[in-house]
Amino acid sequence: MNHLGRIHFTLSHEIDHILLGHFETITFYRNIEIDSPTIEKETQANIFVRELLMPAIVLSDFDVHSAKEISKLCY
C-alpha cells in the first residue's frame, strides 16, 4: 500500500502550523479531537495543504473534478 499521499499531507500540514506560529498544535500522533474541523488552527492548516497539494488552477487545467481523479493526479 502506498502512503505517499498521506505523508505529503501530514508534512505539509505540520509545516503550515510552524509557518502560522501554531507551535502548540504540532503533534506526532493522530487524535480525533485534534482532527476536528471545529478547531480553527486545524482548519487553517488543512486549507493550506489543500491549496498546496491540490491547487484549483491545476485541477481546472486538467479538467479534474471527482475525488478519485484528484487523488490520482495529486497522489
Image: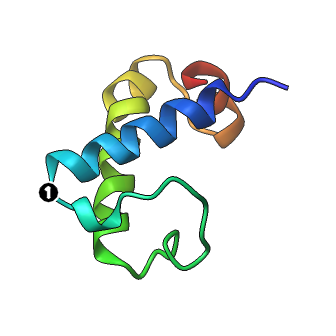
The picture places residue 38, in percent across and down from the top left corner, at 41, 82
Q: Residue at x 51, y 23 (%)?
A: 63
Q: On the picture, is 46 further left or further right than 22?
A: right
Q: Quadrant of the N terminus?
A: top right
Which residue extends farthest right? 1
- SS under mark 1: loop
Q: Quadrant of the C terminus?
A: top right
Q: How is the image coloured?
A: rainbow
Residue with the mark numbered 1: 21
Residue placed most toward the observer, 4 or 21? 21
Q: Quadrant of residue 23?
A: bottom left
Q: Is residue 49 above or below residue 35?
A: above
Residue placed most toward the observer, 30 or 4? 30
Q: Is residue 29 above or below residue 3?
A: below
Q: Residue at x 45, y 58 (%)?
A: 27
Q: Quadrant of residue 59?
A: top left
The picture places residue 57, in percent across and down from the top left corner, at 32, 27
Residue type, mark 1 in image: Gly
The picture places residue 37, in percent across and down from the top left corner, at 46, 74
The picture places residue 32, in percent across and down from the top left corner, at 61, 74
Q: On the picture, is 65 further left or further right than 58?
A: right
Q: On the picture, is 26 further left or further right than 22?
A: right
Q: Residue at x 36, y 46 (%)?
A: 14
Q: Residue at x 26, y 46 (%)?
A: 16
Count neighbours of disc 1 (C-alpha within 10 A) and say few if under 14, some if 14 to 19, many if 20 or more: few
Q: How many marks?
A: 1
